[in-house]
Amino acid sequence: MSSADPAAPDRAGADRERPARGSRSGPEEQRLQGHWLLARLGKRVLRPGGRALTARLLAAARPGAGDRIVEFGPGLGHTARLLLAAGPAEYIAVDPGTQGREALARVLAGHRNARVVAASADESGLPSGCADLVVGEAMLSMQDREGKQRIVAEAARLLAPGGRYAIHELVVTGERAPEISREISRTIKVGARPLPQAGWEDLLAGAGLEVEWSGGAPMRLLEPSRVVADEGLPGALRFAWNLLRNAPARKRVLAMRRTFRENRDHLGAIALVARRPAPAGPDPAA
């Protein structure tokens, strides 16, 4: 799940990692950012296209043995587990906050080549050209235009020539896009700024990256069938039980689902893989 706050953040990505408190009155369930509320209720897969779109994204990005992988905003570590299963030479999670850190630490435990860097996605502090694959899911959608550009530029800087950047975000279509963004932001309490597919492609191209694959899925994050597909039946039942026992949280989650349903014809999930071109070699005809 993804989105960001209505004002441009001082540090790109930092506001995603801290629960938004807003007003100090009322139950905390009314103040938490949507993705952290869902995590507290036991939801583990928080990406807009779910487990299936992440799997398609990684199949297209082809993480492999020997790759140096950087992941922006790893959250609870669902995608980190999949990336580590590929046997990379190195895995680095870039995360400025502590929310979800314990869950991520459990995923990284036992992997000597895996570590966390406490930094923002737009200024990781890692050396240029240090990665063969950079992955970021459900984070660009919550940034304003400048924030998106800074994060994508940082990903491009980290990539070695020929390296891939894989993203999984919200996509919006139609003339109501600004209104839809405002509705989602009010409901999940984080500013959402999804782009149309052409906007995402232009964003990547602006950093010198070449899109080589794209895929999509409906935005069905909170539909019962998607919850079962993402969490498994035991996880889905646990999530439902926690909702039943927590009236303020249930009210928030049902409001989020209602917003997604009302805008389902114009809101979805998108995944793209873009490559940093390798330098052109000498012309053999020269």
Image: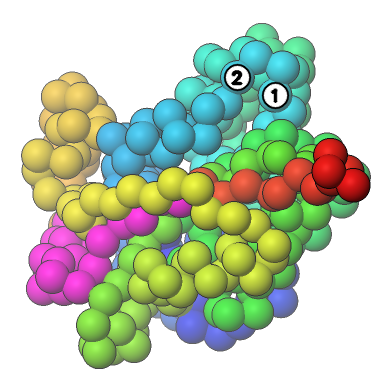
Look at the image and tell me whether residue 112 can be seen. yes
- Estimate the x, y position of residue 240 in percent, counting from the top left: 14, 40
Q: Is residue 244 above or below residue 64?
A: below
Q: Is 266 placed above or below 183 here?
A: above
Q: Nearer the viewer, residue 46 or 97?
A: 46
Q: Residue at x 56, y 79 (%)?
A: 144
User: How many other residues sit within 10 Å of disc 2, few (<14), some (14-19) or many (≥20)?
Assistant: some
Give, as a single range, the part of the protein colored magenta.
248-272
Determine whether the residue tagged by mark 2 lies in a helix, strand or loop: loop
Element at label 1: loop
Q: CA distance from mark 1 to mark 2?
A: 6 Å
From the viewer's side, name the closer residue of 74 and 141. Answer: 141
Tag 2 residue? 64
Of the residues shown, which amino acid type is indicated by label 1?
Asp
- The residue closer to the viewer here, 253 or 46, is 46
Is label 1 in contact with label 2 (beta carbons under 8 Å)?
yes
Identify residue type, mark 2. Answer: Gly
Work out whether residue 43 can be spotted. Answer: no
Give whichever of 191, 100 is nearer the camera.
Answer: 191
Magenta stretch: residue 259 in it?
A: yes
Split into 4 quadrants, where in the image is the N terminus? bottom left
- Residue for point 15% across, 32% down: 228
Within 10 Å of the Cα at label 1, are there few (<14), some (14-19), or many (20+) other Cα atoms?
some
Disc 1: which residue? 67
**Is 38 placed left or right of 126 in the picture?**
left
Q: Residue furthest front?
A: 285
Please tell me in which quadrant of the rendered image residue 67 appears.
Answer: top right
Q: Main secondary structure of the magenta part?
A: helix
Image check: 39 left or right of 137?
A: left
